[in-house]
């Protein structure tokens, strides 16, 4: 019975992650799905992004999300987490595909292999963040998101060391920005819940 109780949260998290990542991921930070009623007039979006380091990206991506017009701050936080998960999956898939290129030099191949490992870990952190989010364990969400950002930064450092910084373009930077925005929104949500 104990084993079943331990597995249930993980199974729930996997179902949520599968649902969250089933939408088409953005191919770049500036291209986000824009279907249905968006949040142009939802004042909570500006409030949710108030402390975001990448405020313009935070507001823009949330306003473009279907259903954001009437979303409460917890839903906006989930949307941001979902956007980040989709983007992280896109980057992870891109790295895996790039590793299939037979013309990669050994240094670049090693750097990208390390990046692949980092993004595998980052996606696990995002999965943990989803589980924590639905358990209202928001401090855990912050921990996992910070760790995912560290994974992207480690990938970027490996590319610099291999003199291959241009290989991934801005993907690591954009992923880190999305993670940072999730952290900011979760912080704002936590503050509002205490008011």
Image (cartoon, rainbow, N blue to C red):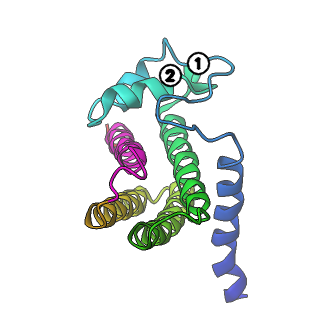
Please state which of residues 195 and 120 is positioned toward the viewer in this rendering. Answer: 120
Q: Which residue is mark 2?
A: 63
Q: Tell me the tag on residue 68.
A: none
Left or right, residue 124 beside residue 60: right
Q: Tell me the tag on residue 38.
A: 1
Above or below for 78 versus 35: below
The percent coordinates of residue 161 (x first, y second) are 26, 67
Q: Which residues are magenta?
A: 164-193
Question: Please, which residue is most extreme toward the top here?
Answer: 41
Q: Residue at position x 40%, y 43% from top? A: 174
Looking at the rendered image, the quarter that the C terminus falls into is top left
The percent coordinates of residue 113 (x first, y second) are 48, 71
Picture quarter containing residue 155? bottom left
- Using the numbered discs, state the Cα–Cα distance from disc 1 to disc 2 in whole angstroms: 6 Å
The percent coordinates of residue 152 (x first, y second) are 38, 59
Question: Please, which residue is most extreme toward the front here?
Answer: 103
Left or right, residue 193 beside residue 38: left
Left or right, residue 65 beside residue 148: right
Left or right, residue 91 beside residue 34: left
Q: Residues within 10 Å of mark 1 (few under 14, many from 20)?
A: some
**Majority secondary structure of magenta residues:** helix
Above or below for 60 versus 77: above
Instruction: Answer with mark 1 or mark 2, whichever residue precedes in sequence.
Output: 1
Mark 1 near mark 2, Cβ–Cβ under 8 Å? yes
Q: Secondary structure at mark 1?
A: loop
Please state which of residues 16 and 162 is positioned toward the viewer in this rendering. Answer: 162
Picture quarter containing residue 69? top right
The percent coordinates of residue 114 (x first, y second) are 43, 72
Looking at the rendered image, the quarter that the N terminus falls into is bottom right
Picture quarter containing residue 36? top right
Q: Is residue 19 a member of the stretch shown in magenta?
A: no
Q: Is residue 179 a member of the stretch shown in magenta?
A: yes
């Amino acid at each position: 019975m104990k084993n079943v109780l331990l597995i249930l949260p993980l199974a729930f998290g996997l179902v949520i992650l599968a649902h969250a990542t089933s939408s088409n991921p953005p191919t770049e930070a500036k291209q986000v799905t824009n279907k249905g009623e968006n949040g142009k007039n939802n004042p909570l979006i500006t409030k949710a992004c108030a402390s975001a380091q990448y405020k313009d990206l935070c507001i823009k991506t949330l306003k473009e999300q279907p259903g954001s017009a009437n979303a409460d701050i917890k839903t906006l936080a989930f949307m941001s987490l979902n956007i980040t998960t989709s983007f992280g999956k896109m980057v992870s898939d891109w790295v895996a595909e790039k590793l299939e290129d037979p013309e990669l030099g050994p240094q670049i191949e090693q750097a990208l292999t390390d990046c692949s490992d980092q993004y595998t870990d980052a996606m696990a952190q995002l999965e943990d963040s989803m589980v924590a989010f639905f358990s209202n364990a928001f401090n855990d969400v912050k921990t996992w998101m910070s760790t995912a950002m560290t994974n992207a930064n480690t990938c970027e450092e490996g590319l610099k060391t291999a003199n291959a910084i241009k290989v991934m373009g801005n993907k690591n930077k954009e992923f880190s920005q999305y993670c940072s925005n999730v952290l900011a929104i979760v912080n704002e949500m936590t503050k509002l819940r205490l008011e």
